[in-house]
Amino acid sequence: MVLFLTAGILLFGTVSTLLIEWNNPGTIGNLSAPEKLLVSFFQTVSMRTAGFASIDYTQARPVTLLIYILQMFLGGAPGGTAGGLKITTFFVLLAFARSELLGLPHANVARRTIEPRTVQKSFSVFIIFLLTFLLGLILLGITAEGNPRFIYLMFETISALATVGVTANLTPELGKLALSIVMLLMFIGRIGPLTLLVSLAEYQPDKKDMIHYMKADITIG
């Protein structure tokens, strides 16, 4: 599953970079076809963990940066050095969404049923990671000096939170307060939302937490 997801993300990122940046002289437009393919693949791999740069991100088209932001958000596989949400968490969410659309009682993958507790953990990790990203983006937007482009702020925020380490030349322009936010995001991203959940698992509920209330009927969608 991990290999399948990784291959799909790498293929999508490589092809997208090739198609979008093919004629862009600021990135890969002046390279030969084999070099364009190599740089596009290298950039896609780098967005998920390495943090290297073979192009100037300030010259890349906004949609390319958006794709890179999504790749950094998804991150790599669990157990590795890559940060981000983790592709297995994303896969569990996709499997659950599929089961809901098809009206299935459980989220099934390859003739296996995903435990409801695993689905709950995946949603918790996703919500915590997303809220951390949004809060960091807002704080960085408030504290950043000048008037940086919003796409650069998003790029900087997710790069720090996913512990990738790339920048659209925004980091040198940040003040001390904004840099402190970037460092805090890197620290949180390195710890990971799952570690936070594990620490909360030791929480001892009191009596009011053990009360089973009547079911709430909430309209969704």
Image (cartoon, helix red, strand yellow):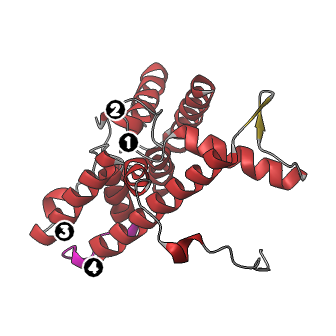
- Give x and y (percent) for residue 113: 76, 36
Identify the disc placed on residue 142: 4
Q: Nearer the viewer, residue 203 or 141?
A: 203
Q: Residues within 10 Å of mark 3 (few under 14, many from 20)?
A: many
Task: Report the Cα–Cα distance between label 3 and label 4.
Answer: 8 Å
Q: Is residue 58 visible?
A: no
Q: Give the residue at x 19% y 57%.
A: 183
Disc 4 versus disc 1: nearer the observer: 1
- Give x and y (percent) for residue 106: 80, 45
Q: Is residue 104 visible?
A: yes
Pointers 2 and 4 in contact (C-beta within 8 Å): no
Q: Residues within 10 Å of mark 4 (few under 14, many from 20)?
A: few
Task: Report the Cα–Cα distance between label 4 and label 1.
Answer: 25 Å
Task: Report the Cα–Cα distance between label 2 and label 3.
Answer: 25 Å
Name the residue type under label 1: Gly
Name the residue type under label 4: Ile
Q: Residues within 10 Å of mark 1 (few under 14, many from 20)?
A: many
- Nearer-N-terminus badge (2/4): 2
Residue 183 falls inside the magenta stretch: no
Task: Report the Cα–Cα distance between label 1 and label 2.
Answer: 7 Å
Task: Report the residue that reaches farthest toward the top.
Answer: 34
| Range of residues picked out in magenta | 143-150
Name the residue type under label 3: Ala
